[in-house]
Image (spheres, rainbow, N blue to C red):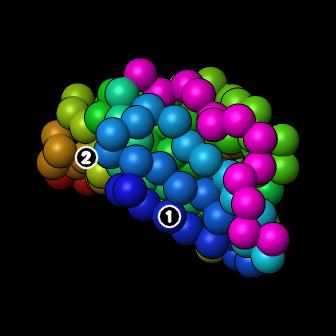
Amino acid sequence: MASAVFSPNGRRIASCSTEDPNLRLWDAPLRHLLGLPLEGHGKAVRSLAFSPDSSRIVSVGVDDALRMWDARSGRSAGALIVRHAGPVSSVAFSPDRTRIASGSADKTVRLWDASSGKPLRAPFK
């Protein structure tokens, strides 16, 4: 497994694997898988993060992309963001849930608008 994170409200766990392009959602108190794996990345998923209000998940992976998910339904919650020039290895929401930061093997950190998926400024190099 590459990563597993609790939702801020403690009700869900999201997990991903370096062997698999899918995410999985778990009911934390009941300790069981919720639905089918979340499919959408073309290659392995490396990291993921919940929004501070526990409503969304952002995932990143070897396909150079970020993908947004609805944490309740498990469905895609926006367009795939592909702007890095290399595998993305880390991701985080801002505490106010308006921005997303991602770090990549392309030696950049990029900031995104969490609602639109658009870049907020030039990358940090």
- For the point 79% across and 76% down, which residue is it? 29
Q: Is residue 82 visible?
A: no
Instruction: Provide residue 104's location: percent of width, then percent of height.
Output: 25, 46
Q: Quadrant of the N terminus?
A: bottom left
The question of residue 6 being in magenta is answered with no
- For the point 33% across and 40% down, which residue is it? 19
Label 1: which secondary element: strand
Q: Are marks 2 and 1 in contact (CB under 8 Å)?
A: no
Quadrant of the image occupied by residue 50: bottom right
The correct choice, above or below, for 115 with respect to 118 in the image is below
Q: Which region shows up in magenta? A: 30-42
User: What's the amino acid at mark 2?
Assistant: Ser
The correct choice, above or below, for 68 with respect to 82 in the image is below
Q: Is residue 43 visible?
A: yes
Q: Residues within 10 Å of mark 1 (few under 14, many from 20)?
A: some
Q: Main secondary structure of the magenta part?
A: loop
Instruction: Provide residue 8's location: percent of width, then percent of height.
Output: 71, 75
The correct choice, above or below, for 48 with respect to 64 in the image is below
- For the point 84% across and 49% down, which residue is it? 72
- For the point 32% across and 45% down, which residue is it? 18
Q: Which residue is mark 1?
A: 4
From the viewer's side, name the closer residue of 103 and 61.
61
From the viewer's side, name the closer residue of 19 and 104.
19
Q: Which residue is mark 2?
A: 104
Label 2: which secondary element: strand
User: What's the amino acid at mark 1?
Assistant: Ala
Instruction: Provide residue 122's location: percent of width, then percent of height.
Output: 33, 42
From the viewer's side, name the closer residue of 48 and 22.
22
The question of residue 34 being in magenta is answered with yes
Instruction: Provide residue 23's location: percent of width, then percent of height.
Output: 56, 43
Query: For this view, does 113 lie left or right of residue 90?
Result: right
Numbered label attached to residue 17: none
